[in-house]
Each structure stands twice: as structure tokens, then as C-alpha cells.
Amino acid sequence: MSVFLRIVCVVAVMASLEGCSRSKARLRADRDAYHLLDQKSTVAGGDIGAYRIGIDPRSRMYDNDSPDCPPMPPDDPTSHHYMVSVDGKKGAKYWREAPRTPWVDPPDWRATLPVDAQGRLVLDSTAAVRLGLVNDPDFQNELEELYLSALDVSFERFRFDTQLFGGSGIEYVADGRVRSGTGESSSQLYVSPSNSTLGPGPANRWRLQKLTATGGEMVVGLANTLVWQFAGGNDYSSRTLLDFSIVQPLLRGGGRVRILERLTVAERALLANVRSMERFRGEYYLNVAVGRFLSGGPQRRGGLLGGAGLSGFAGVNLQVGNFGGGNFGGGNGNSGVAGAAAAGGYLGLLQTQKVLSNQRANVAALRDSTMQLAASYDAGRIDRFQVDLARQALFNAQSQLLRAEADFQTSLDNFKVDLGLPPDIELVIADPLLEPFNLLSPEVTALQNDVADVLLTTVDPVEAVENQVDTALDATPVPDAEPVDPLAGPTLPTPDGPTLSESVPEEVPAEAGETVESDRLLAEAAAQFAVVESDLQTLLNVVPARREHLLAIRDRSEVVNAQIDRALFDPDLLDERVASIEVDVAAWRDSLATLQAEFVEADAAERPKLLRRLSAMLLELSILQARTRLDALDLTPMELTPQEALEIARVNRRDWANARASLVDAWRLIHFNANNLMSAVDLVFSGDLANVGDNPLRFRDTNGRLRVGVEFDSPTSRLAERNVYRQSLIEYQQARRSYYQFVDRIYQSLRGTLRQIRLNEVNFELRREAVLVAIAQVDLTQLRLSEPPKPGATEQFNNTTARDLVQALGDLLNAQNDLLSVWVNNRVQRLNLELDLGVMLVDSQGLRVEMGDDFDMFVPRCPCPGGGDVSPLPLAGPCLLPPDLAQELQTDADGSPNELMKGELANPMGPAPAEETRELTQIDATISPSQLGD
């Protein structure tokens, strides 16, 4: 019975050792990875707890199912056949019985979107970034890459921990009489160490293992074998062996240079990845906000071929020169136009909205101008060709507006997909950032359209039909008799032509209705004039700052080299324009009062003429408002020099710090691979102690053994190691070249960005003047068109009147868009500069912290790390140590100069090239193998 109880106890113990559950393994991995990430975040200047891979429940990526046992997602039916049966073999039962889900993304995730009452997703720039951080798979992938990099470090640290291994096996053996060799059958039960090869050694005995920092391996093991004989004498025997082993490599495979390299690489890679993630957060903000290209985030160094940590690390092919930087695009200037390159991302959509608004205003102005030309044609003051020219320009503008609207919807769909949203969501872009560029107010444009619509309804329908009939009957119509419909598009002629009953409207607006509509239009005009007066007050408030900024850029080299008239930057000219605007505002106020009084006294026949006057006045008001808002726009000049920008970047850019670390990684691998060229000399010390008798715990020294020795392997065949070593030398030289090219590209990018910013500041004033000229051209052509003929004469307009008007309106549209593009590009470049200097701050929610326009405060006032990277070195070489430490090292204890140390500090770059061969020979002769190994 005692034997049976022993067997039952052994089986129970083995059954209880079922290992770690899925959820426990996942949670423990999270605990280790998050602990390491918080450690490195503290070193890299990040926030503790900022890098977690958990999904927000509001996200489209959220999975409400068990993370350890998720249901099977929808499968391809043809491919699924190979899970049921593969190569004639029945598939796993679990594949058929596993729970399933028809969803890949949560079915109700749209309910978490912040839509308005109409079901539209209204976003400003801040909301767009937040939505992308919650839903964008690309950002989540970068977080998970960082997490996996932390797991690599956890494994590399685990390699130096004291590790417990062990296992047992139960085996029942029955031998026949012949097989037993005793003439009798035998039956035995063995409980002994498992023969599994899960760990090192012939048997998976219970043992403790530890790897030291110098490469020593220490193992303490316990092997216990219990045997029960059930046949014959029913015997029991026990054997226990307690052993230990210490192996310390002295040359090859030993020393901290070799043994700690994998852990060093993993730790430094994790720090670099935390820095890369910090920079990526800034890049992601700019990607959503202005469409900046993402250069990439963390890059995992481990996990090669599915291994844990840096398993398979060979010491070469470590992506030499890939320092995690990117986007050295330079200035992103104009693309062959007078303005600047368009922005991307949210700001690009906002810019496109403003361009569309300008196009709509242009269509409204063309429509109003076509009506005026048609009226002049009816009065015999212009020929039909000019009216058709204006109508053709109107049709072209309407077609371009349709195309632009469709392109804008395509851009919206692309933006939604980039945020991780489906394209069918109705998205509305709404942000006040570009409101100052509503030079032509949408409300004024809408009012112009309302006046034009009322004018259409006041045309005498019988007269219009008579004109159409006359046109159909007369093969060579007289210009005065030819009707003109300024707004109708091209129509196909019918065989019989229109009849009188088809052409006459059924109802004619009543006089009372016209009076009410006219009063409404006048009231709305007065309201819009009040907005213009408010814009004038805004302009008066910004005039002092604008005067200072004009003086700051007037004497720049860009202005002189381009031979730009410096009078454009004269503050007195600004004062004259402001005074002119004030005079025009007062004049328009008087004209509105006069028109209101005339409307009160006018009858039905006079109202159309007054409405035409109101239409012309609204065009003047829109131009006046554009002039007022235009001069209220401003850019703060950038005075940062490229040299100062480079020094700021040298101190603050995280990818620059990673570049320095990557260069040293390549240098360190030279010594790592040189270790393999040595002989193998290992010191071995081992021993064991066994029990006596059947008592498994009765250890005696009489049944023990100690062994000590040295193992040697000559370096007679090191061809593969030689090639790897040579490769590491080449890769280090490649890393050196890549590093200074990396610095050059940073400098090039900063110079290009600053150049484009300064160009934008000058070009902004030129584009402002271009808009003012275009406004003056439109104003002049409108005045020419509205001039009454001299008494007793039917004065004809110039043959180019319509063409001049159409061209002036087109020039105004282009000038407005160019001005907007310069301002937008300037903002994009300033944001890019903020990131490329390394001073952009992103808060815990992934949003940029506003820092203002003063970058001078970031210029380092003392020597910074890597100060000799780009700046030319003196022949003697600078001392890069702090002054107090350098002075201490150059002085002996008695205060006398230390000539040897003084020379070392004065020439840290090493011997002259002519002395390299002799110096290397001396180094090889004086450094011992043990020093190289350690």
C-alpha cells in the first residue's frame, strides 16, 4: 500500500504542473513590457504610462471578445476546406467547433462617433487628430512595434537571471523471461528525470542555471531516480545525484564585450525606439494636420525568424546608416505658380474649402457681370460678341467649380480612410483657422445671388417672348432686337420652336411681393455693411504690428536680389491704403442711405433699375470688404539663422541622438566580432555528490567527485569569423559616412525650410499687392460698365470691356488663391521647422502644445553634445570635456601641469595618418588577450 501511495503522489504532483495559462502569460508580458517602457520613457524625457497597446473602447479597432480565445473571423470558403480536411487527413476538431463571429470590426462602433443632429461628423483640426489616434491602425502598429521591442529586452535580461528548469518522467517496463536475462519475467516502474530535450543536457533534470556577465555558465542540478520492482522480490531502489558545473571562457566567447552585447543592443534599441515613438507622435500630428510624410516609428531589432529576443544575432547587417530619421524634403516651395505648394491633411482640406469659396464668389461675380453686360446690350451700348464672351467665361467657371467640388469629395474620402474611417461617413470640415481669408464673404456672395434672382423675376415676360419670336423669324437679326438670356446654359433647338403659351410664365410677381423682397435685400445689405465696419476696426488694431513687420523684411537680401520695389514694404503706403478704405466705407454708407430713400419713393417700374444699382453696390461692398480684410492679414517674420537652427536640432532632435547611438553600435561590433578570432580557452570546474543506499537524501562525500580542467581550441580555422570581422569593419565605415550624410541632410532640410519661410514672408506681401491690383482692376472695369452715357448720346463701350472684366475677375480669383497658398505654406513650414528642430511638444492626448513663434529661446548658450559633428575642427582639436574637468585632468596633485594628459586632451583625434602603422603595431604588441576579451 505504501508503494501505491507513493505512485499516486508522484502522479498528482506531475498533473498539477500544467504550466501558465494564456491570460497569465499575456498579463505578465504586459507587466514586464510596460515596466521597461516606463523606464526608458523617463530617460528619453517622455511621460510614464504613455505607451500602452490597449485599444480604446470607442475605436473601430476595439475587440470585445476574449483576447486569448477570440472567435474565428469570417474565412474564405475555399480556403476553409483545408482546415476541415488537408491532404486527405481530417482537420482538428476544434476548427469545426470553435465559436465564430461575422464581424471583423465592432458592429456598433459608429455609435461612438461625435456626430451632430444631422448625423454628420464635424471635425476641427484637434478633433481630427484625436479621431486618428483612436482609429488609425498605422499608429497602433507603431505602438505594438515598440511593445515588442520591450519584450526583446525582457528576454535578454532574463538570460542573465537565475533560471530553474526541471522535469520528471514515469515509465513502466515489463520484460519477458528471455529479455530479462534472468530466466524470469520482470516488471519495473521508473520515476526519473525526463529525457525531453527542452533544456541543455542529456536529461531534463531539476537544475538552476545562471549566465554571468563575462560568459561564465554555472549549473547546479539534482537528478533523482526511483525504481520499483513488481516481479520477483518486489524490490525498491533509489539513486540521487547532486551536481554542479562552472565553465568560464577566457578568450573566445568570453568577456563583457562579447557576452553583454546582445543585452546592450536590446537596451539601446529600446531607448532609440522610445525616442523614435516620441518623434513619430509629432510626425503623426503633422501628418493629420498638414499632410507631412511619416518617416517611420520604432524598428524592432529582435524577433528574427520567430526567435525570442535577439536570438540569431550575428553582429553584422544591423541596418547600417538607418538612424530613424527622414523627411529631408527641404522647403516644399511653389510648383511653378506665383503662390506656394498646397498643404495636405486637414489644413489642405481647409485650404481647398477656401479655394472653393473663392470660386463660388467668382461665379457669382461673373453671373452679375453677365447680367450687367446683357442690360448694356439691350441699351445698345455693347455688341453681342462681348456678351457671349462673358457667358462663355461663366460656363467655364461653373464647370471648373463642379470639377473642384468632385475633387474635394475625393480628398475627403482619402482623409477619412487615412484616419481609419470608412469613406461613407459624412464628414464636415469646420475650423476657424482660415476665416480671415474669407476676403469675399459668403454672406455677401449669397446676397448678390439673391438680388440676381429677384432681377430675373422682374423681367417683362411678354417682351421676352416677342423677342424670341422675332429672333426665330429673322434670319439676320438686328442686334437691338436679339434677346440675351445671361444665365441660361446652351439649349438644343426644337423643330417647331417654343410657343407663346409655353414661354409665358403662369404667374407674375405682385407689386406687394416685390416691395417686401426689396426691403429684405436692403436690410441684409445694411447688415453686411456692419460686418465690413467691424472688419475695418480689426484692421486698425493690427496696423502697428504690420508696420514693424514691414520694416523687418524691407531690407532683406531676398528683396534686393529680386529687385523688388522697396516701396511695397513702406509703412506709409499701408497708412494711405487704410485711410482710403475709411473714405470708401463712409461713401458706401452714404450711397446705401440714398438708395434706401429712393426705394421708398420708387414705383414698380423703377425698382428693377434700383435693384441693378444695389447689385452694383454689393459688388463694390464685396471689393471693399476684401480690401479691408486683406490688409488685416499678417505674418510674423522669422529671424532664426540656419546655424542657430542646426545647433537647436543638435541638442533637441531625438533621431539625431539615435544616429549617434547607432554609429557607436557599429563601432562596438568591431570588438564584438574580433573576439571570435581568438583561441578558445575555457576553465572548467565541476563536481557531483550521490546518495548511499536506498535513502534518496543520504549524501556522502565518499560517493562524490570533483573535476577541474582547461579546454583549448586553436584558431587554425577562422575563415568565416575573419569574413564577419572584415564585414563589421566595412559596416562601421559605412556608418560613419551615413552619419555625416544624415547631419548634412538635416542641415540641408533646415536651410531649405528657413529659406522657404523667408520667401513666403516676402511673397506674401507681393501676393497681397497682387490681390489689391486685381481688386482695383475689377473695380475699374465695373465702374466703366456702370457709367451712364453722356446726355443726348448713346456712347458705346470699348470692344474689350467684357474681356477686361472677365480677365480682371479671373486675376482676382488667382491672386486670392495664391495669397492663401502662401500663408498656408508658411504655416506648414513653421510646423515642420518646429518638429525638425526637435522642440515640438505633444501632450498625453497626442496634441501639439502651442509654443509661439519665438525659436530664439531654444538656441543653446553653451557647448552641446556632438558639437564637433559639423563645425570644422582646429588642427589641434578641441577639448570636448567640461572646462572644470579638463582643468582638473591637466593638473597633477601638486598643481603642476600634467603634460601627458594635457597632450591627450589637446589631440583627442589620435595620431597623424603617417604614424598609424607604427602605432597599431605597438597596440597589438602591448594589449594582452585578456584585455581584449574583457
Image (cartoon, helix red, strand yellow):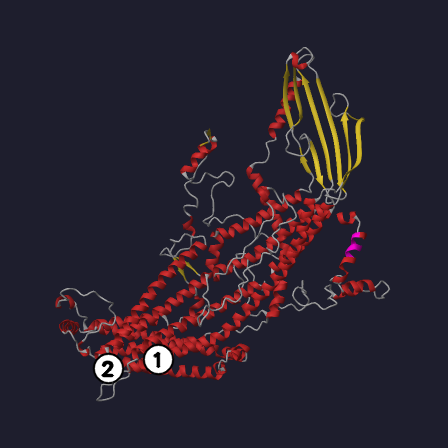
Proximity of marks 1 and 2: CB atoms separated by less than 8 Å: no
Which residue lies at the image location 46% right of the left edge and 70% below the top edge? 822
Residue 504 relative to residue 798: left or right = left
Question: Is 757 a magenta residue?
Answer: no
Q: Eyeballing the image, is 795 above or below 391?
A: below
Q: Secondary structure at mark 2?
A: loop
Q: Amino acid at mark 1?
A: Asp
Q: Looking at this rendering, what residue extends furthest in the right direction? A: 894
Task: Specify which label sits upstream in the sequence, 1 or 2.
Answer: 2
Question: Residue 886 is drawn in which quadrant?
Answer: bottom right
When the figure is inspected, residue 800 is found, relative to residue 889, above or below; the finding is below
In the image, which disc is placed on residue 91?
Answer: none
Crowding near the residue tagged with mark 2, few <14, some 14–19, many ≥20 C-alpha atoms within 10 Å: some
- Judge from the rendering whether residue 30 lies leftward or rightward of residue 348; answer left or right: right
Stretch of the chain drawn in magenta: 919-924
Say what secondary structure mark 1 lies in: helix
Local crowd size for mark 1, using a 10 Å CA cut-off: few (<14), some (14–19), many (≥20): some
Quadrant for the N terminus, please: top right
Circle 2 residue: 381
How far apart are the alpha carbons under marks 1 and 2? Answer: 20 Å
Amino acid, disc 2: Arg
State the image quarter where residue 473 is shown.
bottom left
Q: Note whether 788 is above or below 83 in the view shown.
A: below
> Which quadrant of the view contains residue 745?
bottom right
Q: Where in the figure is residue 369, as x and y percent of width and height?
A: 29, 75
Q: Position of residue 342 (x, y in %)?
A: 45, 66
What type of secondary structure mainly makes up the magenta span?
A: helix
Q: Which residue is mark 1?
A: 779
Name the residue at 25% across, 88% down.
790
Determine whether, in the image, residue 711 is placed left or right of residue 580.
right
Q: Position of residue 856 (x, y in %)?
A: 60, 70
